[in-house]
Image: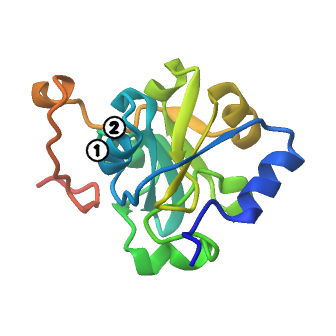
Amino acid sequence: MMSPMIPNAIQSYLRRHRVPFERYAHPRAVSAMELVDALNVPVRRVAKSVIVLADRQPWIVVVPAMTTVDLRQIRHTLGVRTARLAAESEFVDHFPDCETGAEPPFGELYGLPVAMDESLSVNERLLFRAGSHEEALEMRFQDFARLEWPLVASFIQPLPREKEEGKATYGAPMEDSGASA
């Protein structure tokens, strides 16, 4: 059986808009850090899509692979009362041709708004999942920005020293209601 690859809808979308891209097959990698390891690339090259519900509106938030989304910053930037990470059951229907957990950053194609962390704009190229846990996609940042017109702002929590030195640590609040703790 052939392994799941980048859905045809994504490839057609990019070709229709004349966006050059490269595909990279790799061993199955579910997390963004597994993708970094599977492709043996510097972590700064990889971006991930995180689905956030901002006042119940799903957003694709694109951030560097090793970072955590700052829900307070999302709430502030989008001007919403609540922001939380979406449960898979809340967004899986938006990406019917994609493997769950491999959501692509193409909001125009999937009918969702896109926000991108400003730190990614320094990259000439972006490497990310595009619907598959066994194939990644790379394209120029400028092409992505022209295609999606994402809201660009700061959406990540500051990196602790361990992360800056390459050691991954995980953990983030699941929701930020805006109320003081």
Picture quarter with the N terminus:
bottom right
Q: Which residue is mark 1?
A: 68
Pick whichever, 163 or 173, lies toward us: 163
x, y percentage for residue 92? 51, 76
- Give, as a three-letter code, the residue at label 1: Thr
The answer to whether any part of residue 18 appears in the image is yes
Could one spot residue 69 in this view of the protein?
no
**Helix, strand or loop under label 1:** loop
Image point (39%, 68%), residue name:
86
Q: What residue is at 50 percent from the left and 73 percent from the top?
A: 91
In front of the other: 168 or 90: 168
The residue tagged 2 is 156
Splitting the image into 4 quarters, where does residue 20 fall?
Answer: top right
Residue 147 spot, x, y in % from top left:
75, 40
Using the image as rendered, state which of residue 26 and residue 63 is in the foreground: 26
Residue at left offset 65%, top offset 28%:
140
In-image side of 75 versus 104 (left or right): left
Mark 2 Cα-neighbour bin, 10 Å: few <14, some 14–19, many ≥20: many
Residue 103: image x %, image y %? Answer: 52, 61
Q: Residue at x 22, y 57 (%)?
A: 179
Amino acid carrying mark 2 in the image: Ile
- The mark that comes first in sequence, 1 or 2, is 1
* Residue 172: x %, y % from top left: 20, 52
Asked whether disc 1 touches disc 2, contact meaning CB atoms under 8 Å apart, the reply is yes
Q: Is residue 102 above or below residue 121?
A: below
Q: Describe the element under mark 2 as helix, strand or loop.
A: loop
**Horizontally, is 114 left or right of 146 in the view?**
left
